Image (spheres, rainbow, N blue to C red):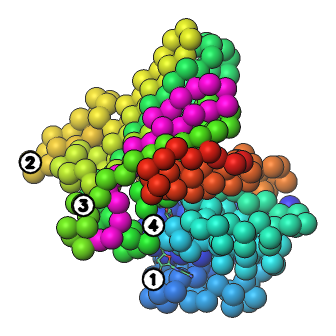
Amino acid sequence: MHKVKIVLIGAGTWGEAHAEIYSSHHLSEFIAVCDVSEEKAKALAQKYNVRYFADYEKMLDDVECDAVAIVTPDFAHAKPIVAAAKRNKHILCEKPLATSYQDLNLILNVLKGKNIQLMVDFHNRWNPPICKIKDDIDAGKIGRIVSAYIRLNDIIYVPTEMLSWAEESSILWFLGSHSVDVLNWIIGAKVKRVYSVYYEGILKSKGMDVPDLYQTILEYSNGAVATMENSWILPNTNPYVNDYKLNITGERGMFNMDFSHNTLLERFLENESSHPDIICKPKIHGKPTGFAYESIRDFIERIYHKEKVRIPLEESIAVTKIIFAIMESAKKKMPVTVEL
Ligand SMILES: NC(=O)c1ccc[n+]([C@@H]2O[C@H](COP(=O)([O-])OP(=O)(O)OC[C@H]3O[C@@H](n4cnc5c(N)ncnc54)[C@H](O)[C@@H]3O)[C@@H](O)[C@H]2O)c1
């Protein structure tokens, strides 16, 4: 097969990460980029010497490609998915798959009868400590999983300065989707029921109509109980953008992961102290390295070799449905049964 020809929709912060891989992987050919901001599309296109567009329908009509990467804001994934699927292109879509029932239905309808692959980029399935935990659990090292605690939070810079569209999303979509996917993957059962409580006020006081955090309990069909915390109001002085911790407790053992405040590398500079990223998205000898890139690489390689993508679509649909239930529970202040 010829190299996988890829086009990119969304030339923002994370679109740049995708572009780095498409332009450097030996099995892919980066063809074109589109952004509603023609300026952003042009800047990225010039960096990688590819064509650029401000309208993805036009791009998909004008260029020949095998796959489409969708890296638009959380609430803007469905329409580009529909456009790509109608043209029978494979799709790598950023998380979450969709943020409304209407969008989810649009996606499910367009995919009916299509022989294309769609993977949602839940890159924690390539995160080394999480993969180690998963392997050990699958090998039966801690027996039946009894409970899990996951906390994936962001500093307040993220909703107030980094994302222009935070109010149109939620910390549940932005980070909670990763948390639910990690829990589902490790626990290996279906969520039956959720109960969630949210807190609001800090972002509201800054004029943003969006909750600050959600605390959620998830009950699984195999009896495991998980607690999940997702907040985006941590102080900007936290030494890393995320506050990411995980505990898995089983009948015969447990795992603790500290992603953000471990002492693998502490850095104390004149005006800054930090625990810099060394496994998510670092550069090693100038090359993009880390699990955030591995998921994108894996997608290219599997499309090239005509293999099934690593994350089945049904599992990403389940994440979306679970988050709908969590939001409903927080709103109603009652547990909600999840229909998967
Ligand atoms: N896998 C991860 O862990 C990870 C990390 C960061 C971001 N993301 C996801 O990536 C997506 C993009 O996030 P970001 O931080 O790059 O946001 P961003 O705002 O920096 O970039 C989004 C870009 O999409 C463009 N855009 C919006 N609507 C469009 C449309 N209809 N057609 C073409 N372009 C359009 C915007 O102009 C913007 O340039 C989000 O879904 C986010 O959750 C994933």
Task: Choose mark 4 or mark 1, whichever is in front.
Answer: 4
Comes first in the chain, label 3 or label 2: 3
In the rendered view, tell whether residue 197 sits above or below residue 324: above
Tag on residue 40? 1
Tag on residue 201? 3
Residue 184 appears at what percent x and percent y?
A: 61, 38
Amino acid under label 3?
A: Gly
- Label 3 secondary element: loop
Read off the magenta span: 208-227
Comes first in the chain, label 4 or label 3: 4
Amino acid under label 1?
A: Lys
Total marks in image = 4
Q: Quadrant of the N terminus?
A: bottom right
Residue 152 appears at what percent x and percent y?
A: 40, 44
Q: Residue at x 64, y 67 (%)?
A: 101
Are dots 4 and 3 in contact, CB under 8 Å? no
Q: Residue at x 31, y 53 (%)?
A: 199
Q: Which residue is mark 2?
A: 270
Q: From the viewer's perspective, is 200 left or right of 82?
A: left
Give the Cα separation between the discs numbered 3 and 2.
34 Å
Are dots 2 and 1 in contact, CB under 8 Å? no
Residue 274 appears at what percent x and percent y?
A: 22, 43
Q: Which residue is mark 4?
A: 169
Give the Cα separation between the discs numbered 4 and 3.
16 Å
Q: Residue at x 56, y 89 (%)?
A: 54
Are dots 3 and 1 in contact, CB under 8 Å? no
